Image: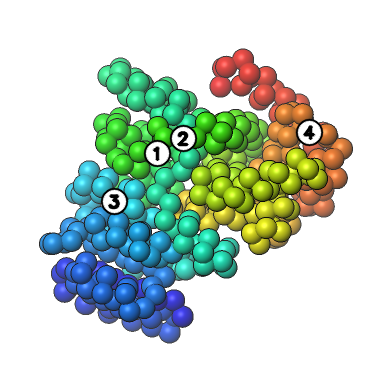
Amino acid sequence: MKRILFCDDEVKITDGLRRMLRRQRKEWDMVFVNSGREALEAMAKQHFDVLVTDMRMPGMDGAELMLKVQAMYPGTVRIVLSGYSEVEAALRAVPVAHQFLTKPCDPEVLKSIVQRACALHALLEDSKLQGILGGIDSLPSLPKHYHMLTKALADPEVDVEELASIVEQDAGISLKILQLVNSSFFALSQTISDISQAISYLGTNMLRNLVLGVEVFRGFKECDPKVAEAISKEQQHALLVSRIAQKIMQRMDKDRTLSEHAFIAGMMHDIGRMIMAIHLPEQFNETNRLVEKEGGWVFPYEEKIMGVTHAEVGAYLLGLWGMPYPVVEAVANHHHPSRVSARRFDALAAVHLADSLAYGIEGSDVEVIKATLLDGPFLAGFGIEEGYETFLEDALSVHETMSAGTV
């Protein structure tokens, strides 16, 4: 049974949550407290899978509470509950909150968010890994992207498309922006997975505050040169995959949402490798050493060493941060798409195919790719048995456009 801790200084709020969630008692062991101090006392006595806390509380507010929980109990999922008028104040919670909810909160939305958070543990059974990932407040990013963005934001005439073209080059910045814009602070009727649209909803002023004033970006300037080089290669590959996946999806299905999901999933598909480079350096270096010595792809060595691959690692964090389920699913399974019973060509299929095409363009042996990386039977289910050749022209076109600097 999952343990959920609810914290709000208003007794009527916690009483209302208790009544609202009465039916969940068979699935959740719930505790309700009225201060940050009481929350920490409760957590010292027993483990909690999820913390849902109010933002504004006397004494210790929600941001301070989550900062302490992040340090002491990183494996606990942290969800902030706040008012619609507190968006600017909520920026303080961005570095330490996994997800954001607003008052009054729809009971079904709250149940869904908490259930998804609990279900994520199935991706990673290793509690140590859960703790490491739960404690992450930002993703590896390159200083050059940060500096490009701050320079652009200093221009009062900068437009959304110019900002989006910079943000799309960096998975870490992109993910933080998508995390915030998809929070219920914005009360949007649909999930946003398009960077331009996300920036439009945030607005230039809030983006400026997020980038310049929030501690989540503090690590950008302190990046080890070797790590920076590894991250740079990962980001270049990810951007190529995202563009190819988007083009493939546009050809296969005209649904714009599917195309956006394919682009974001492509951008994030190897984010687990970036996480490993910073937070699991021993495993990252060992898997690279084995690839150099034995050959082959990195993910089988990861599974041998850690019991999971970068795909599950990345998907776990994306799920924690509230990314759309199709994106999380595509990232988790992009090397093993047959684990998903797919009835429609979607982001998972597009990213799986785009990843193999990108490796071919980057110089890997095509026959080896087809034999060891490409899941032929999975693609055959969509009538594209010769998937690699079918979309190679599209992939080369994307690569040429990117090389010319027009994307």
CB atoms at circles 2 and 1 under 8 Å apart? yes
Q: Earlier in the sequence, mark 1 or mark 3?
A: 3
- Residue position for label 2: 223
Q: Which mark is residue 93?
A: 3
The residue to which callout 4 is attached is 364
Looking at the image, residue 341 lies above or below residue 310:
below
Residue 298 x, y percent position in the rendering? 71, 46
Is disc 3 surrounded by few (<14), some (14 to 19) or many (20+) residues within 10 Å? Answer: many
Q: Count the marks: how many?
A: 4
Along the line of sight, the residue nearer the viewer: 93 or 246: 93
Q: Position of residue 205 (x, y in %)?
A: 26, 31
Label 2: which secondary element: loop
Give the Cα separation between the discs numbered 2 and 1.
Answer: 7 Å
Q: Is residue 253 left or right of residue 130?
A: right
Q: Residue furthest top?
A: 404
Q: Which of marks 4 and 3 precedes in the sequence?
A: 3
The answer to whether the residues at label 4 and label 1 have Cβ atoms under 8 Å apart is no
**Label 3 to label 4: alpha-carbon separation:** 43 Å
- Camera-nearest label, 3 or 2: 2
Which of discs 2 and 4 lies nearer the camera? The answer is 2
Q: Identify the mark nearer the N-term, 3 or 2.
A: 3
For image coordinates 31% across by 37% down, the residue present is 210
Give the vertical position of 298 relative to 36 (above or below): above
Q: Read off the residue under disc 1.
A: 219
Cβ atoms under marks 3 and 4 closer than 8 Å: no
Q: Quadrant of residue 206?
A: top left
- Horizontal side, residue 65 vs residue 321: left or right: left
Task: Report the coloring of the rendering.
Answer: rainbow
User: Residue 128's spot in the image, x, y percent?
Assistant: 51, 64
Quarter the C terminus occupies: top right
